[in-house]
Amino acid sequence: MIELPPRSASPIARFGGQPIAIAAVALCVVVFGTGSIALWRAYTGGAPETDRAVATRQLQARAAQASEQLVEKTKGLEATQQESIDQLQVVQDQLQTVRRLLAAQQGDTRKLSEQVGTLTEAVEGLRQSFASAQAADPSAETAPRKRSYKAKSRGSRSANRNRGKARS
């Protein structure tokens, strides 16, 4: 069988008889630890809690500043977008106006093309009738043309003018 050691052999049992000594050692450890922490803080010049608070405030200030910058940039983008929309609407209005003008010009061009075609047919018909009239009347081709009264008077006036210039 296995023998169990007596209860008095455990390390806790050894110190159990001297509770005042344990309390005194614990108190010394606590006082020494507190003193060393106080000395360390005094030597480094600041407490970590205040450093953390300052760092937190700085982070909050940076976040607020970044947020304000984002708001300003967003407003700038909105203004730019609105300007772009306005310019696009102006361009669309101009495009519609140009389309209307182009459609009107195309309509006018069609009408003019039809009128030119009609005039071409009329001129061709006149040529044919004139050609057939000349073919039917051979004496009209051989007879010299007579000048009208106005043409004669114009010719004599210009001849008189030319004579007057030559004399002077």
Image: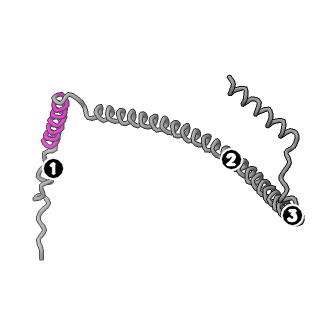
Q: Which mark is residue 138?
A: 3
Q: Let me know if residue 32 is in the magenta part.
A: yes
Q: Nearer the viewer, residue 89 or 27?
A: 89
Q: Which mark is residue 98?
A: 2
The amino acid type, in three-letter code, at marker 1 is Gly
Q: Residue 138: where, in percent of width, then height?
A: 87, 64
Question: Quick one: SS at disc 1?
Answer: helix
Q: Residue 86: where, in percent of width, then height?
A: 62, 40
* Residue linked to disc 1: 16
Which of label 3 and label 2 is nearer to you? 3
Q: Quadrant of the N terminus?
A: bottom left
Which of the two discs, 2 and 1, labels the residue nearer the N terminus? 1
Q: Nearer the viewer, residue 154 or 74?
A: 154
The amino acid type, in three-letter code, at marker 2 is Val
Write the start and end of the magenta stretch as one range: 20-42
Q: Residue 45: where, in percent of width, then height?
A: 20, 28
Which of the two discs, 3 and 2, labels the residue nearer the N terminus? 2
Residue 90: quarter of image: top right
Q: Residue furthest bottom?
A: 1
The amino acid type, in three-letter code, at marker 3 is Pro
Left or right: 101 with respect to 18? right
Question: Quick one: SS at disc 3?
Answer: loop
Q: Nearer the viewer, residue 165 or 26?
A: 165
Left or right: 85 with respect to 17? right
Residue 159: quarter of image: top right
